[in-house]
Image (cartoon, grey):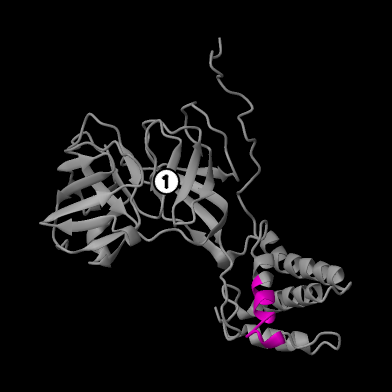
Amino acid sequence: MAFTNTLQQIGNFASTHVDLLPLSNVGGYTNEPLLSICNDALSDLIADPNDWKFNRNEMPFFITCPNKQDYLFAGACVFCLNQTTSSPQPGWLSQGWGIGLASSNAITVSGGVVTINTLETHRIPVGAVIYMNGVTMTTGTSANYNSTFTDNGSISQWGGNNWTVTAITNTSLSFSASAGQNNGDIGGAAGITNFAYGTSASMQEVNNNSSPPNQYPLTYRRELPVISRVAIPSQVAVMTDLGTGVLKIRMHMVPSSTTYAVNIVYQGKPPIKTSLTSDWSPFPDNYAHVYRQAVLYRMYRYLNDPKADNEYKKLEAEIMKVQSADDAESTDVSLQPSEPLMDNSYWGWW
């Protein structure tokens, strides 16, 4: 995608309208109010329910834990699995936990020992064989701290890098460093800092070796209630963006001993532009007519011009025209009731 149009170019175009004046460097304030108008225009465009394909982001998966509804997640997780009868860790349940932020040195290596700090109190015991996903290293090589998933058509499994836990605290795990993990390495989760709102979700069962893996759609919700019922989850919601790169995510129902890798697709936040030479990303050039109209609307609104309402209607029409192209594509996504039409309730069927 091409991003060649600048904020200044669109501002110049808007200022050619006979009733609009140049709106940069007004009152001696550098770039203002045009810079703020352009940022407001981006916020107008990246707002629910506008699901722009070019602005979709796929969150790294997090791993569920038995009988746990809420999860703190920043983009990386540590987990253990019971995938085969010859598993080296029989007797405890598969589970996953969010790894702390790389900016907080959540993964460190000292004296030949790797220590991982988790975002919550974990339940992984000493002796468990663990895997990691989504790890980014500020010092060291990320590939040496991430495991790999393979599916050869007969069996699917996690492999590659894995480690045996040698020591724990409530919020940390330690193990002997393996090849490529060196004293002084620092890393963790990159953080999810651009979450605006979720649009869809899915999950994959990870504690069996079936090929293809068992996968299920999830309905994404704005929020979900606290519940204690344990069943196969059907819904997920990001309940809180803590503003640090950490999200609080809730499942519904509560996952059981079957462990899932949960993936959420979301719209990224509108970026904050700091200069009129900035481009209009994430909007590519072929959407110029949309953000051009968004700027016109915002300029008329800034001037308290009665034309602003009509310009907003034009903006809605431009958005609808572009997104109507999606309507031509068939989809298997359908409306689902928030609760099953029939269930066992607590007493069961007789």
- Residue 83, x across and y down, in percent: 27, 39
Quarter of the image containing the N terminus?
A: bottom right
Q: Is residue 35 magenta?
A: yes
Quarter of the rendering containing residue 347: top right
Residue type, label 1: Leu
In this picture, which residue range is highlighted in magenta? 26-39
- Residue 19, x across and y down, in percent: 86, 85
- What is the residue that sits farthest to the left in this orientation? 111
Quarter of the image containing the C terminus?
A: top right
Q: Residue at x 50, y 32 (%)?
A: 253
Vertical arrangement, residue 12 with respect to residue 232, above or below: below
Label 1 crowding class (10 Å Cα cut-off): few <14, some 14-19, many 20+? many
The kind of secondary structure element at disc 1 is strand
Q: Which of the two residues, 350 or 71, is positioned nearer the viewer here?
A: 71
Q: Which of the two residues, 30 or 103, is positioned nearer the viewer here?
A: 30
- Residue 132, x across and y down, in percent: 28, 52
Q: Residue at x 60, y 49 (%)?
A: 332
How many marks can you see? 1
Q: Which of the two residues, 110 or 250, is positioned nearer the viewer here?
A: 110
In this picture, residue 32 sits left or right of residue 178: right
Quarter of the rendering containing residue 274: bottom right
In this picture, residue 171 sits left or right of residue 15: left
Residue linked to disc 1: 72
